[in-house]
Amino acid sequence: MFVAPRAGTVTNVEVLDEIRSLPTCRRLVVKVRNGERIAATSDLLSSTRLGWALLAHRDATAVDRDHIRARACADRLHIAT
């Protein structure tokens, strides 16, 4: 799940597409588009508003590594207030 630390207008959504190339990525769902206004993430239910990634592999180390990479991609998402 991706977190919106603040409310605002989303740009740079394409950075989330980089998650698809991670070896452990089994599914990526992006629910926002550039220019869309979003609310800040406030609870578990609202954490699904931006989207989510499913990472899976027999090697837990690979999943951990890709989780860090996926978070880094999500951190590059711009939310302008």
Image (cartoon, rainbow, N blue to C red):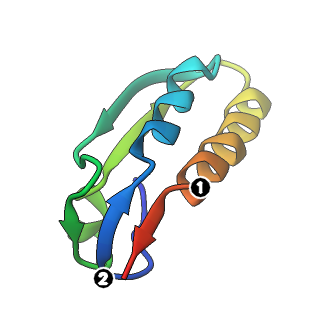
Q: Compared to 53, does 75 lie above or below?
A: below
Mark 2: few/some/many CA within 10 Å (<14, 14-19, 20+): few
Whole-percent x, y for residue 1 in the image: 40, 53
Q: Residue at point 29% right, 68% down?
A: 9
For marks 1 and 2 on the same chain, the one whose residue lies earlier in the sequence: 2
> For numbered disc 1, what is the local secondary structure?
loop
Q: Quadrant of residue 79?
A: bottom left
Q: Residue at point 38% right, 30% down?
A: 28
Whole-percent x, y for residue 81 in the image: 36, 83
Q: Compared to 23, does 32 lie above or below?
A: below
Q: Quadrant of residue 30?
A: top left
Whole-percent x, y for residue 18 in the image: 56, 29
Q: Residue at point 67% right, 51% down?
A: 72
Residue at which label 2 appears: 42
* Nearer mark to the viewer, of 1 and 2: 1
Q: Nearer the viewer, residue 76 or 40?
A: 76
Q: In the image, what residue type sits under mark 2?
A: Ser
Residue at which label 1 appears: 76
